[in-house]
Every structure is written in structure tokens, then in C-alpha cells.
Image (tube, rainbow, N blue to C red):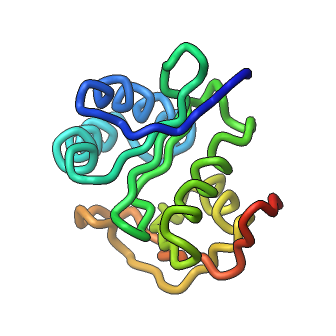
Amino acid sequence: MGLIIIERAKQHDFANLLQMWGKAVRSTHHFLNEEDISFYREVVRNEALPHLEVWMIVGEDKQPLGFIGLDKHRIEMLFVDPNFHGQGLGTKLIQFAQERYGNQLLVDVNEQNNGACRFYERYGFVQVGRSELDGSGRPFPILHLELQSYKPGVLP
């Protein structure tokens, strides 16, 4: 894969990140239909990207391969281009967040997204709560996770 770096996303990066978000959601959120994806795309475009601390992982060509949206110690979103799943980019983004904000990381994950649930559990996140509805009041249960056993530099 070559050299990769993590850099702060700027507003001009958001269109590429939104496109990547759509590809990633379609490959991982099989419980959402197109109407749901369109709804959440607007939330990501208008509420999440402009108001979060967004960091992207880029390759040598400076094209984003994945990104993480943080609200201090809360991971609000983490998406990797499906073409690069399983190559350690999500791990690098989690490590980046941990190095930036310590071991007090929190994340909410869709209960139906088994891959994401397993991903976070692998890094020491444990369930501390559950909500029947997501943050938009839609019927997609959310698991509230908290990092409890992550050790910097130690990969699972």
C-alpha cells in the first residue's frame, strides 16, 4: 500500500469523504435501504462532517482511504473505503484517536452491523448501554461502547 498518513480533513475534502461513506455504508450496513442511506447522507453532509474533528488516512497519492470523525473522546464515525477493508486502516484510525484522547474513547454502533461490533470488540470496547432507536429516532438499535482494555501499540 505504500506510505500512508493521517491528516486533518478540510472542507474541500468532504465531497470525497461523503462518496467514500456511501460506498462503505452500502458494503457494511445491509439493514439500510436506499431511502435510509439518502437520509443519513444528508445528516453526514450537513451535520457530521462540518461539525466534527475529521481526520482522514491518505495514501501516497493524497486520496483518502478512510476517515474518523471525533467529538473529543467520542468516535462519531469511522469509515474505510471498502476496497481497503482488512488492511489495517481502521486499526490506525483507532490508534490515532487513542493517542489523541487517551483510553476514554466511546463509540455508538448499529447493533445490526455485526462487522463493526466485532471490530470494536477486538480493540477492547465493551457494551455499556443500548438504545432501541438511533440518534435520529429511527428504529435501528444502537450499542453504546466504551474502550476498557486498549493498550497503545498492541494490536489484537
Between 16 and 42, the residue placed more toward the observer is: 16
Between 99 and 139, the residue placed more toward the observer is: 99
Name the residue at the left extreme.
46
**Image quadrant assignment for residue 96:** bottom right
Query: In the rendering, at what x and y percent does residue 19 appear?
Result: 38, 25
* Residue 112 in the image: above or below residue 80: below
- Identified at 67% across, 57% down, the residue is 119
* Residue 43 in the image: above or below residue 45: below
- Identified at 44% across, 28% down, the residue is 20
The N terminus: image quadrant: top right
On screen, residue 120 versus residue 30, left or right, reads: right
Total residue callouts: 0
Query: In the rendering, at what x and y percent does residue 86 appear?
Result: 74, 38
- Identified at 43% across, 43% down, the residue is 55
On screen, residue 17 versus residue 62, left or right, reads: left
**Image quadrant assignment for residue 142:** bottom left
Query: In the rendering, at what x and y percent does residue 8 appear?
Result: 39, 40
On screen, residue 141 versus residue 4, left or right, reads: left
- Identified at 77% across, 60% down, the residue is 153
The C terminus: image quadrant: bottom right
* Residue 126 in the image: above or below residue 139: below
